[in-house]
Amino acid sequence: MKIAVSACLLGENCKYNGGNNYSEKVMKFVEGHEVIPICPEVLGGLSTPREPAEIVDGDVKNKDGTSVDKQFRRGAELALDMIIKNCAELVILQSRSPSCGVNTIYDGSFTGKIIPGQGVFAELLKDNNIEVMDVANL
């Protein structure tokens, strides 16, 4: 099976703060499968590290209020294209992210409050009937 995975979960330093979200659970889950690392934010042209971003009234914005919605949505489209071209059957994403949050995201106040919702990439995948799994559910 081909599985696309948020690159940060595989240990790639592509998080907004320059770090990663390495997950041993993910590594065990994908063992024996073909893995496609993917980071929509980097694909959209955002640097690492970068300012933290959250979805504010449907628009992805940095903490200083600058919109990065265009980069997030472009990255989501490019990542979707990679998943389709590679025939990935499942995508495992990082929780709470404004791009990859499957079930929950930060509320847009930059206070750490989590609410039900989806990141722009997770939403795009679901809209295209691609199976998505939140790392928190592994």
Image (cartoon, rainbow, N blue to C red):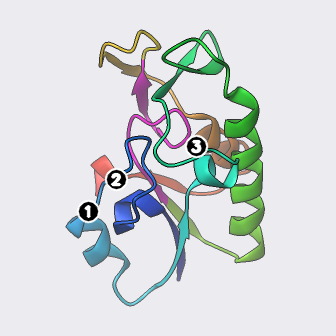
Q: Dot 3 corresponds to which residue?
A: 122
Q: Nearer the viewer, residue 73 or 115?
A: 73
Seen in the picture, residue 93 relative to 58 is either above or below; the reply is below
Seen in the picture, residue 72 relative to 47 is either above or below; the reply is above
User: Rounded to the nearest whole Å, what is the CA distance between mark 1 and mark 2?
Assistant: 8 Å
Seen in the picture, residue 136 relative to 87 is either above or below; the reply is above
For residue 135, the mark is 2
Q: Nearer the viewer, residue 103 or 119?
A: 119
Q: Dot 1 corresponds to which residue?
A: 23
Give x and y (percent) for residue 104.
41, 30
Is 103 magenta? The answer is yes
| Magenta highlight: main SS | loop
Residue plotted at (53% across, 31% down)? 118
Residue plotted at (45% across, 37% down)? 97
Q: Which residues are magenta?
A: 92-106
User: Rounded to the nearest whole Å, what is the CA distance between mark 2 and mark 3?
Assistant: 12 Å
Earlier residue among tags 2 and 3: 3
Give x and y (percent) for residue 32.
38, 90
Q: Quadrant of residue 122?
A: top right
**Element at badge 1?**
loop
Earlier residue among tags 1 and 2: 1
Please identify, in this view, whether the residue under mark 1 or under mark 3 is nearer the observer.
Answer: 1
Disc 1, disc 2: CB below 8 Å?
Answer: yes
Q: Which amino acid, by three-letter code, is at mark 1?
A: Ser
Q: Quadrant of residue 88?
A: bottom right
Please indicate whether residue 23 sits to the left or right of residue 71 in the image: left
For residue 91, the mark is none
Q: Classify mark 2: residues with Cα within 10 Å, few (<14), some (14-19) or many (20+).
A: some
